[in-house]
Image (tube, grey):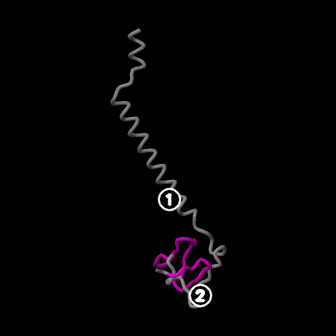
Amino acid sequence: MSEVRKITAVSRRNLLRSATLMAGGAAVLVTAMTATSARADKMAQTAAAYQAKPKDGQQCDGCGLFQAPSSCQLVDGTISPSGWCKFWAKKS
C-alpha cells in the first residue's frame, strides 16, 4: 500500500510549477485573443462610406475617433487627416 501512495503522491513543487505554467499560458492566450479581436473590430472603408476628402466642413482630424497620423478607431486602413466617413463625431 505504501507503494501506491508514492506513485499517486503529488509534490508541492510540481503542483506549484504546473499552476504557474498554466497561469502563464492563460495570460499569453488572453493577450493574443485580445490583440486579434481588436484588429477584427475595425470595419472596411467602404462600409463606413469613407472618402479621402472632407464633407460639409467635417474631416477626420476633427473627429474624436481619428488617431494621428493616419488611422481610426473604427475604420480599417490608412486614413487621411482630411478624409471623412459617416461615423464622424466632433472631437471634444
Judged from this view, the residue extending furthest toward the bottom is: 57
Residue 51: image tag: none
Q: Which residue is drawn at 42% across and 19% down?
A: 8
The amino acid type found where label 2 is placed reads Lys
Residue 39 lies in what quarter of the image? bottom right
3D distance between C-alphas at marks 1 and 2: 30 Å
Q: Position of residue 34 (x, y in %)?
A: 50, 56
| Residue on which the image places disc 2 | 53
Q: Main secondary structure of the magenta part?
A: loop
Mark 1 — residue?
A: 35
Query: In the orientation shown, which residue stands out farthest toward the top?
Result: 1
Q: In this view, does 46 lie to the left or right of 24?
A: right
What is the crowding at mark 2: few (fewer than 14 residues within 10 Å), some, or many (at least 20)? Answer: some
- At 48% across and 75% down in the image, what residue appears? 67
In the rendered image, the residue lying farthest to the front is: 92
User: Hey, what amino acid is under mark 1?
Assistant: Ala
Is 66 one of the magenta-colored residues? yes
Q: Which of marks 1 and 2 is nearer the N terminus?
A: 1
Residue span colored magenta: 65-90
Would you place residue 41 above or below residue 15 in this image?
Answer: below
Q: In which quarter of the image is the N terminus?
A: top left
Q: For the residue labelled by badge 2, is the local secondary structure a helix, a strand or a loop?
A: loop
3 shown above or below 12: above
Q: Label 1's element?
A: helix
Query: Which x, y percent locates residue 20?
Result: 38, 39
Is 55 a magenta residue? no
Disc 1 residue crowd, few under 14, some 14–19, many 20+, Cα 10 Å: few
